Image (cartoon, rainbow, N blue to C red):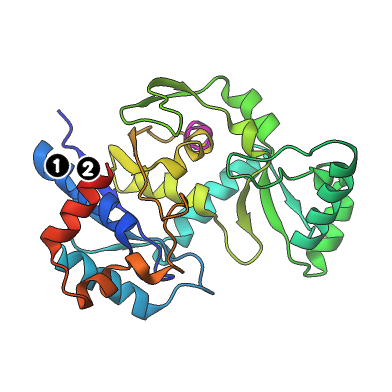
Amino acid sequence: MTQPVFRFAPSPNGHLHLGHALSALFNFDMARKTGGRFLLRIEDIDAARCRPEFEAAIYEDLAWLGIEWEQPVWRQSGHFGEYRAALEKLEAMRLTFPSFESRAEIARMVGDRDVRERWPRDPDGVPVYPGAARQMTEADRHVRMAAGLPYAIRLDVEKAMEWAGPLRWRETGAGPSGQRGEIAADPAAWGDVIVGRRETPTSYHLSVVIDDALQGVTHVVRGQDLFWSTSVHRLLQVLIDLPAPAYHHHRLILDADGRKLSKSTQATGLRKLRAQGMTPADVRRLVNAAV
């Protein structure tokens, strides 16, 4: 049998909080129980927000919790070549297109449509991309790209779904509404997602499926906030011909207002809790109580 491989993949754009501790401990414990491997991945493709001091803090906090990981640590910033190759494959399949609209322009287009009827939102509540750039001619695209205008590379989800066909995944945890077992993927709910940008040949969605495949991850264990992102990930896995890991989504630790924890809220930050005298055993009790 294949040895199970689990991973914890934080972004070094802030300090870890209790929600991160839950996911890291969950993966680490499952790896130990199954005789599997535990990997640490640093998701640092966002050069503007990721900082070395936050990465160092991640190592310190995880070690304090008693978590051990294999070396070397996988850092996304060292794998742009692999992401670029995957993006070029999607482009060669004619499943991508560049979009040049700014966030403000997209918001304005959506706002105009919202006047007539509510514009569709993705599972995160963000308005779905209106699709204007899909109608642009190749000549217009080349002119804008040659002029050095910023752009995002989007996946034409409708064409991609026609190519891939129906998609499903096996859920061993539970979705936000208690979904379990065989889950029908719905990539269309996300619209034409971004898979790269002019300055960065990847996105979260593209990087995570490439990383999981290259690292041999067999079990993706993460929070329920990423449950429906699995629809996009399954689509990309089929398009790029990557293996599909098993998926397990766990409950989130919520704040007093019922919202998921944020790095911008320091009340549940591991460093602050440690400074207040909390022990790793205390943290384990807190996260166990949450799930």
Q: Residue at x 45, y 22 (%)?
A: 183
The correct choice, above or below, for 273 with respect to 187 in the image is below
Q: What's the mark number on residue 5?
A: 2
Q: Quarter-wise, where is residue 223 in the image?
A: top left
For label 1, the residue is 36
Q: Residue at x 25, y 70 (%)?
A: 273
Q: Label 2: few (<14), some or many (≥20) within 10 Å?
A: many
User: Residue 98 placed where, x, y %?
Assistant: 74, 52
Is residue 239 in sight in this rendering? yes
User: Residue 125 placed where, x, y %?
Assistant: 63, 44
Q: Depth check: 135 or 232 in front?
A: 232
User: Residue 281 placed where, x, y %?
Assistant: 11, 59
**Horizontal arrangement in the rendering, residue 250 relative to residue 32 (left or right):** right
Q: Depth check: 263 or 39 in front?
A: 263
Is residue 68 in sight in this rendering? no
Q: Secondary structure at mark 1?
A: loop
Give the alpha-carbon distance from disc 1 to disc 2, as whole Å: 6 Å
Q: Quarter-wise, where is residue 70 in the image?
A: bottom left
Magenta residues span: 234-239
Q: Residue at x 57, y 43 (%)?
A: 89
Q: Depth check: 83 or 221 in front?
A: 221
Three-letter amino acid code of the residue under disc 2: Val
Q: Residue at x 41, y 61 (%)?
A: 43
**Horizontal arrangement in the rendering, residue 120 relative to residue 74 (left or right):** right
Main structural element of the magenta stretch: helix, strand or loop? Answer: helix
Please say if the residues under marks 1 and 2 sit with CB atoms less than 8 Å apart. Answer: yes
Q: Quadrant of the N terminus?
A: top left
- First in sequence: mark 1 or mark 2? 2
User: Residue 106 placed where, x, y %?
Assistant: 79, 54
